[in-house]
Amino acid sequence: MTTEISDAIGRAIEYLRDHPSEAKYTDSAATAVLEGGLRVTVTGPAGERLATDMPESIGGRGELPSPGWFLRAAQASCLASLIGMEAARAGVALSRVEVVVDSESDDYGILGMDDSVSAGPLKSKAMVRVEASTPTDLRALVAMADRHCPVTDAVRRAVPWAIELSDSVR
């Protein structure tokens, strides 16, 4: 599997070197619809689907993961994927990769109780466990993966954000 991943990455790099104008693109959209209460269904253009809910303590039913949990899941899965990619590029065989992401939040922010408190996580961290059957500098490999992980990069830096409102009253 390591060779397949490394070969695919090599082909992608070669293609983009030959077609640099195709490196930048618009990512596929996620469309969220509030279904009732605080349950939200999110769909993608190729039929991707997930659903969220908020905890009971703030009016949800607590039956599904919250959007914040999906953020942590995206961080964890993206970093684990990039560790796999970087290991494949380096020819390192991995026997296990486990990434646990947690964060610390203050509900004063999300509930609008204090505008000086951020609505999102105040800090987050990843605990990474990597087992490799090939000797390598695992710290360097994980650091390289983290530098190239699009999700952790987006969380780490301020990505420009805009909202366009298309209002309709019925």
Image: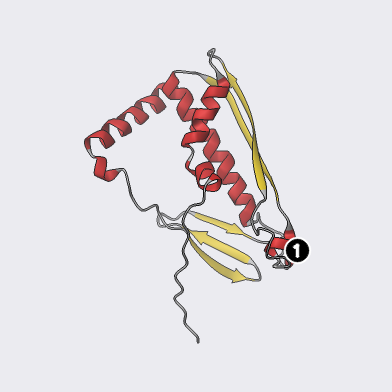
Nearer to me, 119 or 80: 119
Q: Give the image quarter of residue 109.
A: bottom right
Q: Name the residue that disc number 1 marks.
A: 56
- Residue at x-position 66% and y-position 46%: 123
Q: Determine whether, in the image, residue 112 is placed left or right of residue 48.
A: right
Mark 1 Cα-neighbour bin, 10 Å: few <14, some 14–19, many ≥20? few
Can residue 1 be seen?
Answer: no
Please, which residue is most extreme toward the front here?
116
The answer to which of 107 and 133 lies nearer the viewer is 107
Residue 108's spot in the image, x, y percent? 74, 62
**Residue drawn at point x = 59 percent, y = 28 percent:** 97
Colour convention of the picture = secondary structure
Residue 163 in view here: yes
* Extreme-left residue of the structure: 18
* Quadrant of the image occupied by residue 166: bottom left
Q: Can you say which quadrant of the picture contains the N terminus?
A: top left
Amino acid under disc 1:
Glu
